[in-house]
Image (cartoon, grey):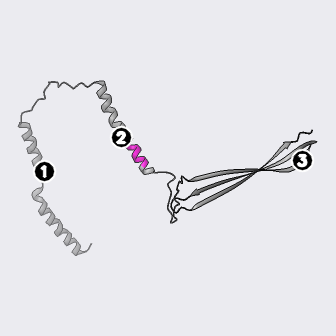
Amino acid sequence: MTLKAEKFEELLSREIAGALEPQRGKALAAFRAHMAEEAQRPQIAGSLKQERAKQISAREMWFWSSVPSVAAACLAVVVTLKVVGPVNQPTNSGAQMANVIVSPEVQQVERTTRQDGGVLVNNNVPMRVVTEQTTRETQWVDPRDHSVYKLIQPVENVNYERVQPF
C-alpha cells in the first residue's frame, strides 16, 4: 500500500470510531435496564377458569367441512378447463374458415333401373346377369343467395339370378 492510502485509511478509521464511540455499550445498557424494570413488575398469573367450548352438531360439522372442499374442487375444475382449453380448437392461419349452413330445403330422389346383361353358365348352372343402376339425386337451396345446388351419386350393383329351366 502506498503512503497516501495508509493515511487515508487511518483518517477514515479515526472518523468512524469517533462517530460510533458514543453508541458503544448503549444497546447492552438499554437491555439491562429493561430487564430490571420487568423484574420489578408484579407477575400476573393466568386464570384457571375453563371456558366452555361451543358444541356443534354432526350435521353442522359435515356442512362446514364439505362446503369449502366442494367450492375448491369446482374452482380447480374451472381453472383447469380455462388453462387447458379445448384440444381441437380451430386455428385461423390466415385462411377463412367455411361457414356451415344447414338448409331446410333439401330434396332427395332415388331412381333405380335394371338392365338384363344376358345369361352366364357357371358350373353347368345358368345364371342371369342383372345390373342395377341407382342414381341418388340431392338438391338444396342456399338461403343466402337462393342458389340451387344439385348432387348426383351413381351407384351400380351387379347381381346374378339363377335361371329356372322350363
Residue 79 counted in the magenta span: yes
User: Residue drawn at (63%, 51%), measured in percent from left and top?
Assistant: 108
Q: Are marks 2 and 3 in contact (CB under 8 Å)?
A: no
**Label 2 crowding class (10 Å Cα cut-off): few <14, some 14-19, many 20+?**
few
User: Residue drawn at (6%, 41%), measured in percent from left and top?
Assistant: 37
Q: Are marks 2 and 1 in contact (CB under 8 Å)?
A: no
Q: Can you identify the residue that label 2 sits on? A: 72
- Residue 130 image point, x, y percent: 82, 48
- Residue 79 image point, x, y percent: 39, 47
Q: Can you identify the residue that label 1 sits on? A: 27
| Mark closer to the observer (1, 3) | 3
Q: Secondary structure at mark 2?
A: helix
Looking at this view, is 158 or 7 the one in front?
158
> Which quadrant does the C terminus fall into?
top right
Q: Secondary structure at mark 3?
A: strand
Picture quadrant of residue 160: top right
Q: Which mark is first along the chain, 3 or 2?
A: 2
